[in-house]
Amino acid sequence: MDATELEPDNVTAWLWLSGVAGSLAEAVACLERAVAVEPENIKVQQALSTARRRLSDTWVQEAIEAIHVGETETARDLLMQAVERDETNVAVWWQLSQVLEAPNEREICLENVLALDPDHAEAREALESVQRDKALADAILDETAYAPATYVQEETWLPDAALPFISPPESEAAPIPPAISTPDIFADELGCPYCATPTAWEDRRCSVCGHALWTHQREVEKRTSAYWILITLEAVLCLGGGLLPLLLLTYVDMRVDFADITELFPVYLGIRSITPAGAAVVFGLAPRLLFWLALIPTGLSLLILSSVLSRWLPLYFAALLMGALRIIAGISGAVIVISTRLEPATSVLQEALRVAPAGRLINLMRTGIIVADLGGVALSAFALVSLLSLQNHFSYKSRRLLLCVDNDVEGSEVGLWLRGRAYAQQKTWGLAALHLRQAMMIEKRLEACLMLVVAYTNLACFDLAASALKEAHRLSPDNPQIDELTALLAEKRAGESELYGATT
């Protein structure tokens, strides 16, 4: 039994429960009960208002994520819950206007957005579009046959009564002057990502700013885990490839009382010569061809590794050829080991130098050579198959640059802001403004707002830049950057006026 069961009218108990609540919704419910107990308690009312705003913001974010995965009904339910908790949240009304289908309901949502934020340029444009569509429908359909209530009842999922209309405060009760209808420059994905000028799909460059509209890039830009597995496998084959010739020379050293293993390397490489009888015994135990076949996979593995790391398409095909040669060399070496049994050619030569009999240890060594050779062949075959599946890591494709939000940051306020800032640094003003505008819809951040002013100004969208400046002034009236951007905007507008005056 908690404190509220003993004292249900104890405000302190409800406040304590709101602090230990398992979810934000439970905390809001506790604060609502506390306000019901003491309606005049200002601190409790402020805490409830803050909690409701946080809860509605959370629901808005969840709704945006639901929209992205196609769960529109879930998004509607979340946004309607957010409306019931906080009717003064601009983001809630704006997102709700995006998921409702009925013109009447969308109109109510957009009017509520403008009642709360008269400078919301996108809501104003959307509202004018809805009103134009309704007027066009009224002109086409017979007025007596067209019943708006029937349309709402048939086409909507919720009656109009469930959407409260928010009246502007008395200080803002004056009618909002109609704004000039301007098309949304970001509505067309084929717009230039640098200057937002409309372009055609087949255009190679923007006719206004001259930037390229197509990029030549890899099909797979980031290296995948399969690619790194192949790199690791090739590195293992490079290091392990030197084991096979070492095993061969160790085997010869164990059979012949000739010299230590370091002196056998120059003999097989042809740098040092020995007597004909000694050469016949040594090369009878392990032919020189077998030694070179054991060295080939190591060299090929090193070349293949370099080719894969370069990610150059011609070297990719060369790596495929070298991979096939590596398998052939490995199989040939295994065949020679099995067929010759690594024994001297004749008994006469065998007696010329003292050769140890093939005991158990030596037979194990021979078996190890065969296993190592066949194991290298198996790994080489697996590496070749892996390389064949990774052609898209080496090939390139042409991609059309689109004026749209990047999928990996869509719905993330921080991600949209950071991506917008990155595009602004690259002077890709169209994409910068688009991402920053989306970030501002989720949460109004001063840094994003100021950067949005710069992007709009560079795009010559001076009315939108002025609206963003008003929002920045509301967020931080004393910020010195606002005055600088105001002066910059005035200068750009004056330059535009002079340009238009000269052309007319």
Image (cartoon, rainbow, N blue to C red):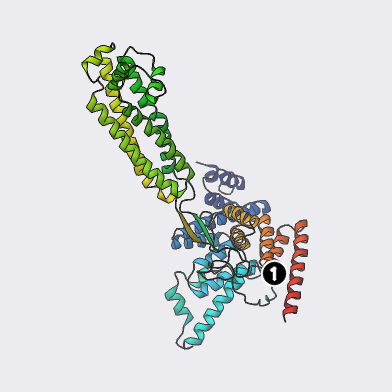
Q: In this view, does 392 lie to the left or right of 365?
A: right
Q: Residue at x 57, y 52 (%)?
A: 415
Side of 349 where 177 appears, left or right: right
Q: Which amino acid does label 1 sit on?
A: Phe
Kindly state the secondary structure of the residue where label 1 is placed: helix
Q: Quadrant of residue 420?
A: bottom right
- Nearer-the-camera pick, 45 or 356: 356
Residue lying at 58% horizontally and 74% vertically, measured from the top left: 127
Front in this rendered view, residue 214 or 179:
214
Relative to 146, residue 213 above or below:
above
Looking at the image, residue 255 lies above or below residue 441: above
Front position in the image: 31 or 472: 472
Q: Which residue is drawn at 22% across and 15% down?
A: 348
Count every numbered label the image shows and give the total.
1
Give how far across and how far down residue 468 sits, in percent: 68, 64
- What x and y, as percent, mark residue 23? 52, 48
From where the camera sits, is residue 430 visible? Answer: yes
Relative depth, front residue between 433 and 144? 433
Residue at the location (41% across, 20% down)?
A: 272
Mark 1 closeness class: few <14, some 14–19, many ≥20 residues within 10 Å: some
Give the side of residue 128 with respect to residue 70, left or right: right
Which residue is tagged 1? 462
Tell me where residue 104 appears, x and y as whole percent: 52, 75
Give the image quarter of residue 305.
top left
Q: Quadrant of the C terminus?
A: bottom right
Q: Is residue 102 placed above or below 69 in the rendered structure? A: below
Is any part of residue 359 visible from this angle? no
